[in-house]
Amino acid sequence: MVRGVVRGLWCDPADPRFTPFLLVPFLAGGHQANVPFLSALNLHGMIEQIPHIVFCATTGHTRLRKTPVGTFSFHRIHPNFFAGFDWYRGGRDFLIATPEKALVDSLYVSSRGGNQFGFFPEIEFGKVFRFREAQKWAERIPDPRIRKFVQKRLQLLRQQDGSRESPQKVCHAPSGAPLGKTKSRNPSAPKGSSARPPALPGASS
């Protein structure tokens, strides 16, 4: 009925409340951790591709943990930049980065060679995503070289999003005035907090 994850940690995959994201705080080795990067972007509905690996941000060391219930890739974020997350969908299941912080964290890691985090050919920002908020997070990056890299990539993504929102089809009324249509998506975006994860249902240590 239960499955061993790592030494001293068990879970019940059959529990309807269970998700591999619940294991993130237990696998962080005593350090803070949350779900950002591509995993968060998918959960927020901004990208459709579901990552095969659970990507995690941590104040500890960067490392890869393979378990019987999934592979967890932990990436170190500077402690002064470890913020911008909240409980998923208002519950207390696991901590997830806001859409803006998830994107900035992805670009942050890509500046250090994490190529899988740097390109988003099918990303949908929607009306809730706030580029101004993302820029504010980028300004808080401690390393000036990484900060400049992330700010430049954000600007390019904003221009890309603007080109997608331009009218796709234009028809002309008798007076010659153009009429256009645009489309958008509206994913949910929880606000950030610095809450710490408690013991969670479906997982124990």
Image (cartoon, rainbow, N blue to C red):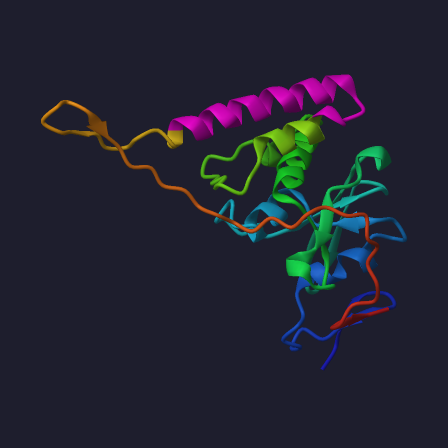
Q: Pick the residue in front: 11 or 202.
A: 202
In the rendered image, the vertical position of residue 146 relative to residue 103, given as above or below: above
- Furthest-right residue in view? 30
Is 60 left, or right, of 186 in this rendering? right
Q: Is residue 113 visible?
A: no
Is 14 left, or right, of 9 in this rendering? left
- Furthest-left residue in view? 174
- Furthest-front residue in view? 175
Q: Which residues are magenta?
A: 139-163
Is 64 left, or right, of 103 in this rendering? right
The quadrant holding residue 172 is top left
Q: Position of residue 163 (x, y in %)?
A: 39, 26
Residue drawn at the location 75% of the way across and 61% of the way down: 23
Q: Position of residue 125 (x, y in %)?
A: 50, 39
Residue drawn at the location 76% of the way across and 27% of the way down: 140
- Which quadrant of the figure contains the C terminus? bottom right
Q: Is residue 176 visible?
A: yes
In the rendered image, the vertical position of residue 51 relative to residue 155, given as above or below: below
Is 80 left, or right, of 153 in this rendering? right
Q: Position of residue 138 (x, y in %)?
A: 69, 27
192 part of magenta stretch: no
- Which quadrant of the figure contains the N terminus? bottom right
Residue drawn at the location 58% of the way across and 23% of the way down: 153
Q: Pick the residue in front: 177 or 140.
A: 177
Q: Position of residue 120 (x, y in %)?
A: 51, 35
In the rendered image, the vertical position of residue 33 relative to residue 137, given as above or below: below
142 part of magenta stretch: yes
Residue drawn at the location 71% of the way across and 22% of the way down: 147
Task: Characterize the magenta stretch by its predominant secondary structure.
Answer: helix
In the rendered image, the vertical position of residue 138 relative to residue 90, given as above or below: above
The quadrant holding residue 133 is top right
